[in-house]
Image (tube, rainbow, N blue to C red):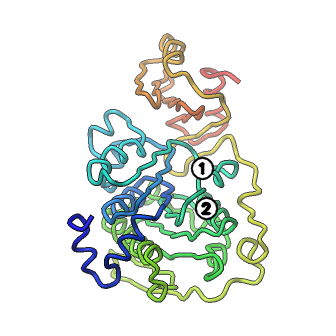
Amino acid sequence: MRERYSRQMLFAGIGETGQQKLAGSSVCIVGMGALGSSLANHMVRSGVGKVRMIDRDYVEYSNLQRQMLYDEEDAREALPKVVAAQQKLSRINSSIQLEALFMDVTSSNIHELLENTDLVLDGTDNFQTRFLLNDACYSMGIPFVYGGAVSSRGMSAIFIPGSTPCLRCLMQSPDAGGQTCDTVGVISPIVDIIASYQAVEAIKYLVGAEEQQRGELVSIDAWHNQFYTMKLGKPRSDCPCCQLKQYPALMQKEDTEISLCGRESVQISGHAPFDLLLWREKLEPAVNGVKENPFLLRAQLNEGLRLVLFADGRVLVQGTDDIVRAKTLYARYIGN
């Protein structure tokens, strides 16, 4: 350990004691896209003992501009992001316990997914999931490091139950502007900047440097040279999460059909787990081509769209954001 982390241990804020605390810590990263892959890289290289990674998606060529752990081979093979990340990170630091969960995060499974975790890192790309993480973390007493990046802008803050307000105190609507990387684009440097702010707050917390915790929301526009901070202040007295403890995101019924903003894709869930080999045989006569790996199957439809079947029972209908059309195609090829 001493040789690998020698430069980090020379830093007075960490030292040998802090390094031992990192080695005994467990973090959960939800979302392994641009922010998540950068966060995982920082956590693994810093020596955090256990890193759990959760993501529902697979690597595509459009990811490679900003998602630094992945390469062209991952995109060709359509590897799940968590699988590709685990393969890369295990070669970077074989002493770290890496857990890769290829699945969707929902209100019904989130408590189980966050169990035995010291800290949750936000690598997601939508506020619905962020509010779910926020509510689950506050219900379980787990600190939550928020981060978001789109276009050339980004924000970050650490929310600590019992010490700071929560995300809902600052942003009461889960829509929060509606812009995503898939609608307005993103440049890779802002992703690295925001992930670095998240990572350093995570490390501060894990080594016990409470007096150095920022206590502010950082907002940056790297293209227009803007930087400002906002004190987190006191919780809102009517906050349904950290004050009233109602945790609304945990109470919401899960949608079985979701249009993924800006991606021309609809996710449909609720099917039993797929036997991908069996479904290849079923679909091949009816479609224009099928590709598969151990985790998913991609079927090119005659209509010019594509079905992606995941082993856990999820289906993506790619090429449309029309839920009615997606459900029609789902019923035609998959059934009810």
Question: On screen, 240 above or below 230?
Answer: above
> What residue is rendered at 63% in x and 21% in y?
332
In this view of the protein, which residue sits in the foreground, 241 or 170? 241
Occupied quadrant, residue 5: bottom left
Residue 99, x across and y down, in percent:
45, 48
Question: On screen, 292 above or below 151?
Answer: above
Using a 10 Å C-alpha cutoff, classify the residue at mark 2 as few (fewer than 14 neighbours), some (14 to 19) or many (20 or more).
many
In this view of the protein, which residue sits in the foreground, 77 or 120? 120
Residue 157, x across and y down, in percent:
50, 76
- Choose the circle earlier in sequence order: 2 or 1: 1
Q: Which residue is mark 2?
A: 133
> What residue is rendered at 26% in x and 53% in y?
92
- Which mark, by number, is residue 317? none
Q: Report the number of discs.
A: 2
- Tag 2 and tag 1, C-beta contact below 8 Å: yes
Is the N terminus in the top left, top right, bottom left or bottom right quadrant? bottom left
Q: Which residue is mark 1?
A: 105
Residue kind at label 1, given as amino acid type? Val
Question: Which SS class for mark 2?
Answer: helix
Residue kind at label 2, given as amino acid type? Leu
Question: On screen, 252 above or below 209?
Answer: above
In this view of the protein, which residue sits in the foreground, 115 or 21? 21
In this view of the protein, which residue sits in the foreground, 158 or 152? 158
Residue 323, x across and y down, in percent:
64, 39
Residue 207, x across and y down, in percent:
43, 76
Q: Is residue 174 left or right of residue 251?
A: left
Is the C terminus in the top left, top right, bottom left or bottom right quadrant? top right
